Image (spheres, rainbow, N blue to C red):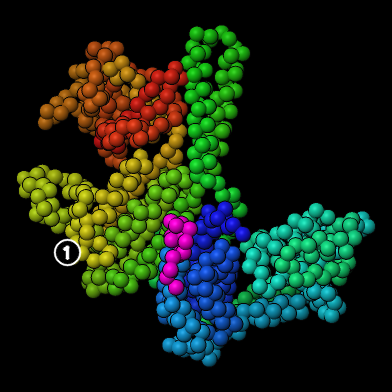
C-alpha cells in the first residue's frame, strides 16, 4: 500500500503525541503514582507504535513497542516509577523526535536503531538497576472496580438492578445516565426495536480507532446509536481495550446490524441481542452521592505523597508550586488545513477588499445613486464578515508552541545545576498561525537567557534571602489588537555596569559615549549580534547568539521587544505582536504627492502644529505637547521627496508610539482611515528601509506602508 499520501497526517499526529508524552512524563516525574497519567502515556506510546508500523517505520515502531511494554508493567504495578526511568523515557522521546525530523526531511527514518536505549528499556523490564515494586499499589483497574461495587451497594435501586442482571449480558452490567435511560424507555414505549451490540476488535489490530469509527458509521446507516460505551470521543481517541458496546434504536433486524458491523475488516466478533431498558442501572442514587465525600476522603488518606515538582504550570500571580490539575484536558475537535490553502483563501479575501475599495472610489461622483451605494454597503458587510471568518480560521492558541518549554527547563536545570521552576499562563491566547510558527525560537532564547544569566546560584540566592528554586514566568495575554508575551524571572537582573564595560572593551562604544547613555540604551546593546556578557562559552549560552535572534525575528513579524530590569530583583522581557499580519486598519496620508499608509495600532493622536511651536533641542526639531517633549520626523526627508503642505504656516503631525517612545511624523495631508491589504515587497526589493510593505488602493494606485518601528 502506498502510504506517502498520509505522510503529512502522520507527521502532524506524531508531533502531537510526542508533545503529549513530554507533558505527561513531566507530570509522572512529579506524581509517580498517578494512574491516569500512566494510562495516558501507555495509550500515546501504543498509538505511536501503531502509526509507525502502518507507515512502515520499523525502528520507530520497535522503540515505541518497548516503551509500551514498560508502561504495561507500570500499569499493572509490577514496576515502580523511579527517576532513572524518567531520564531514559526522555531520551526515548528525543530519539523519536530525531526519527520524526528525518521523516519530515527525507520521508525516511534513518539508520539509527537506538540499541542502547532499547537495552535500557529491557533492563527496566527486568528490574536491572531498578528497585522491585515490592509494595506496589494495586493495579488501577481492580481499584476502580472496587469503587464501582461499593458505589452500587450504596443505593438500593441500583444495587437491586445490578444484582438481578449479574449473570446477564455485558450491557446490563454497566450504569447509564438518567437521560440515556429516559430516551431508551421512551423508544420502547413507542414500540421501537432496541438492540445492544458488543463489538470485539482483533488483538493485533493496529488502527483500532479507525475500525471503531467504521463500525459506528455502518450502524448509523441502519439506526440511531443511543448509547456508546465508551463514549464516541473515547472511541475516536482509541481510549478502549479491544471491545466496545453500542445500544441502537433501529427498524432493521438484529441480524442486519450484526452483519454490517462484521463487514468491517479486523473485527473479531459481534455479539447482539434485544435490549430491555427496564433492566439497566442508573448512574447513582442520592444515597450513593451523599456518601461520595466520605469515600473521597478515604482515597485521599490512602494516596501516597507525591515527590516535589521541579517544573510547574500555574498562573503568574501565584509564585508557589501549584497543585496538579486533575481530570483530562478537553480534546479540541479540529480540522487540519494546509497553510497554503489558508494563504490562498486570504489572497481571495484581499482581492475582494481591493474590489470594494474600487467601488468606493468609483462612487465618489454618484452620491445620489442610492442603489449603487446600497450595493457598496452590502459588499462592505460581506467582506468584513469574510475577513473575520478567515481570521478566526488562521488564529491558533500559542499552546502548541509553549508546551515544549517545561521539558526544556527541566533539562536546563540538570545542565546548569540550578533549581528552576517554570510557571506559565495564557496558553490559550490566540495568534495568527504564521506568527505562532515563528515565535518559538525567540521565546526559547529568552527562557534560556533567564535560566543561565538571570537565575543566580543557590548560594547567592540564599545570601539574598530568596527561595532556593529560581522562578521563571511565561505569560501571554491579549492587549487590544496586540498579543503580549512576557518572560520574567526573580533572578539577578541585568548588571548595567558590566554591560557598559563589556561594550567599551569590545569597541562597540567609547567611554565618552557610555557616559552619555541611559541605562535603557546600555541594556539595548545586548540585542547587538555577537554581544554576550557570559564569562565562558557553554552549551547553553556565551556565543552571543540569542538576543539578536529575538530582536530580528520579532521585528520581522512587525512586533517589538523591550526589557525592564532591576539589579538583584529580576528582569522582564516583553514581546508585543500584532494579532494578524494580512489585513490592517491604516491611516492614509500624503507626503510629497505620494500616498502612504500608517498602521492605526501605532498612532496615538493627530495634531495640527503651528510652525512657531516647533523648537530646536540639540539641533533636532521637537514640540511640547501637553507637557511632553516629542521629537519630530519629517517624512519627506526620510523618503527623499519634496514636501507640498496645504498650509505653509502649520503642519499636520501624526503622533506615533513604539513601547514608551513617542515621535511626531510630519506629513503634507490627511486622507482618512482605510482597511488595507498588506502585500510583501520581500521578493522584489530587499532590505527596504522604513517600508514594511505595500497596498493597492481603490483606484489601482500602489501605496507604501510606513514601518513605524524602524523609524523609532
The residue located at (19%, 57%) in the rendering is 532
Q: Is residue 307 left or right of residue 606?
A: right
User: Residue 495 versus residue 466: which sits nearer the camera?
Assistant: 495
Q: Secondary structure at mark 1?
A: loop
Snapshot quadrant of residue 35: bottom right
Badge 1: residue crowd in 10 Å (few <14, some 14–19, many ≥20): few
The quarter of the rendered structure image containing the C terminus is top left
Residue 311, visible in the rendered structure: yes
Position above or below: 73 against 280: below
Residue at (59% x, 64% y) in the render: 54
Using the image, determine if residue 562 lies above or below residue 373.
below
- Looking at the rendering, the stretch of residues picked out in magenta corresponds to 99-113
Residue at the disc numbered 1: 535
Q: Residue 365's x, y, as percent?
A: 50, 8
Q: Quadrant of the N terminus?
A: bottom right
Residue 569 seen in the current view: no
Q: Residue at x 46, y 64 (%)?
A: 109
Q: Residue furthest bottom?
A: 134
Amino acid at each position: 500500500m502506498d502510504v506517502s499520501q498520509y505522510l503529512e497526517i502522520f507527521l502532524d499526529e506524531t508531533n502531537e503525541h510526542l508533545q503529549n508524552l513530554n507533558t505527561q512524563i513531566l507530570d509522572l516525574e512529579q506524581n509517580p503514582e498517578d494512574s491516569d497519567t500512566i494510562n495516558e502515556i501507555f495509550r500515546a506510546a501504543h498509538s505511536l507504535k501503531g502509526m509507525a508500523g502502518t507507515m512502515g517505520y520499523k525502528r520507530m515502531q520497535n522503540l515505541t513497542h518497548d516503551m509500551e511494554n514498560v508502561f504495561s508493567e507500570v500499569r499493572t504495578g509490577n514496576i515502580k516509577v523511579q527517576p532513572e526511568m524518567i531520564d531514559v523515557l526522555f531520551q526515548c522521546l528525543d530519539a523519536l523526535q530525531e526519527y520524526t525530523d528525518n521523516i519530515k526531511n527525507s520521508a525516511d527514518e534513518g539508520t539509527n536503531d537506538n540499541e542502547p536505549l532499547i537495552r535500557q528499556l529491557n533492563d527496566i523490564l527486568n528490574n536491572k538497576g531498578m528497585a522491585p515494586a515490592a509494595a506496589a499499589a494495586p493495579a488501577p483497574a481492580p481499584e476502580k472496580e472496587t469503587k464501582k461495587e461499593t458505589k452500587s451497594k450504596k443505593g438500593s435501586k441500583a444495587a437491586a438492578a445490578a444484582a438481578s442482571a449479574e449473570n446477564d449480558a455485558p450491557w446490563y452490567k454497566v450504569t447509564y445516565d438518567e437521560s440515556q435511560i429516559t430516551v431508551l424507555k421512551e423508544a420502547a414505549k413507542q414500540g421501537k426495536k432496541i438492540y445492544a451490540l458488543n463489538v470485539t476488535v482483533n488483538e493485533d489490530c493496529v488502527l483500532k480507532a479507525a475500525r471503531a469509527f467504521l463500525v459506528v458509521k455502518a450502524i448509523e446507516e441502519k439506526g440511531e446509536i443511543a448509547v456508546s460505551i465508551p463514549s464516541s470521543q473515547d472511541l475516536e481517541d482509541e481510549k478502549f481495550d479491544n471491545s466496545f458496546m453500542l445500544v441502537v434504536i433501529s427498524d432493521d433486524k438484529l441480524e442486519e446490524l450484526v452483519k454490517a458491523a462484521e463487514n468491517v475488516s479486523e473485527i473479531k466478533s459481534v455479539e447482539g441481542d434485544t435490549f430491555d431498558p427496564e433492566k439497566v442501572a442508573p448512574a447513582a442514587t442520592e444515597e450513593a452521592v451523599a456518601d461520595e465525600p466520605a469515600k473521597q476522603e478515604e482515597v485521599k488518606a490512602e494516596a501516597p505523597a507525591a515527590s516535589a515538582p521541579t517544573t510547574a504550570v500555574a498562573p503568574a500571580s501565584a509564585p508557589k508550586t501549584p497543585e496538579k490539575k486533575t481530570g483530562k484536558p478537553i480534546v479540541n475537535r479540529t480540522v487540519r488545513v494546509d497553510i497554503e490553502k489558508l494563504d490562498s483563501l486570504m489572497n481571495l479575501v484581499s482581492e475582494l477588499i481591493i474590489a470594494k475599495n474600487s467601488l468606493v472610489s468609483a462612487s465618489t461622483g454618484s452620491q445620489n445613486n442610492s442603489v449603487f451605494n446600497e450595493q457598496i454597503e452590502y459588499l462592505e458587510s460581506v467582506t468584513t464578515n469574510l475577513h473575520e471568518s478567515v481570521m478566526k480560521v488562521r488564529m491558533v492558541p500559542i499552546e502548541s508552541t509553549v508546551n515544549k518549554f517545561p521539558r526544556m527547563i527541566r533539562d536546563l536545570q540538570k545542565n546548569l545545576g540550578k533549581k528552576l521552576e517554570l510557571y506559565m499562563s495564557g496558553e490559550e491566547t490566540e495568534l495568527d498561525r504564521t506568527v505562532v510558527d515563528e515565535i518559538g525560537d525567540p521565546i526559547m532564547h529568552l527562557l534560556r537567557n533567564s535560566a543561565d544569566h538571570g537565575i543566580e546560584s543557590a548560594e547567592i540566592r540564599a545570601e539574598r534571602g530568596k527561595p532556593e528554586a529560581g522562578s521563571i514566568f511565561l505569560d501571554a495575554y491579549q492587549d487590544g489588537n496586540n498579543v503580549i508575551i512576557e518572560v520574567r524571572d526573580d533572578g539577578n537582573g541585568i548588571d548595567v555596569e558590566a554591560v557598559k564595560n563589556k561594550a567599551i572593551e569590545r569597541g562597540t562604544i567609547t567611554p565618552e559615549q557610555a557616559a552619555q547613555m541611559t541605562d535603557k540604551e546600555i541594556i539595548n546593546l545586548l540585542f547587538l549580534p555577537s554581544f554576550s556578557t557570559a564569562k565562558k562559552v557553554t552549551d547553553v549560552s556565551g556565543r552571543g547568539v540569542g538576543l539578536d535572534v529575538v530582536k530580528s525575528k520579532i521585528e520581522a513579524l512587525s512586533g517589538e521587544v523591550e526589557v525592564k530590569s532591576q539589579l538583584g530583583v529580576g528582569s522582564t522581557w516583553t514581546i508585543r505582536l500584532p494579532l494578524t499580519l494580512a489585513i490592517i486598519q491604516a491611516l492614509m496620508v500624503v507626503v510629497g504627492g505620494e500616498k502612504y499608509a500608517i498602521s492605526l495600532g501605532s498612532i496615538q493622536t493627530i495634531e495640527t502644529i503651528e510652525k512657531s511651536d516647533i523648537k530646536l533641542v540639540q539641533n533636532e526639531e521637537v514640540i511640547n505637547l501637553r507637557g511632553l517633549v516629542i521629537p519630530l520626523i519629517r517624512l519627506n526627508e526620510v523618503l527623499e521627496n519634496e514636501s507640498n503642505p496645504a498650509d505653509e504656516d502649520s503642519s499636520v503631525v501624526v503622533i506615533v508610539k513604539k513601547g514608551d517612545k513617542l515621535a511626531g511624523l510630519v506629513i503634507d495631508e490627511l486622507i482618512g482611515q482605510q482597511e488595507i491589504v498588506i502585500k510583501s515587497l520581500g521578493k522584489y526589493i530587499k532590505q527596504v528601509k522604513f517600508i514594511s510593505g505595500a497596498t493597492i488602493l481603490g483606484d489601482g494606485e500602489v501605496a507604501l506602508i510606513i514601518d513605524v518601528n524602524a523609524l523609532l
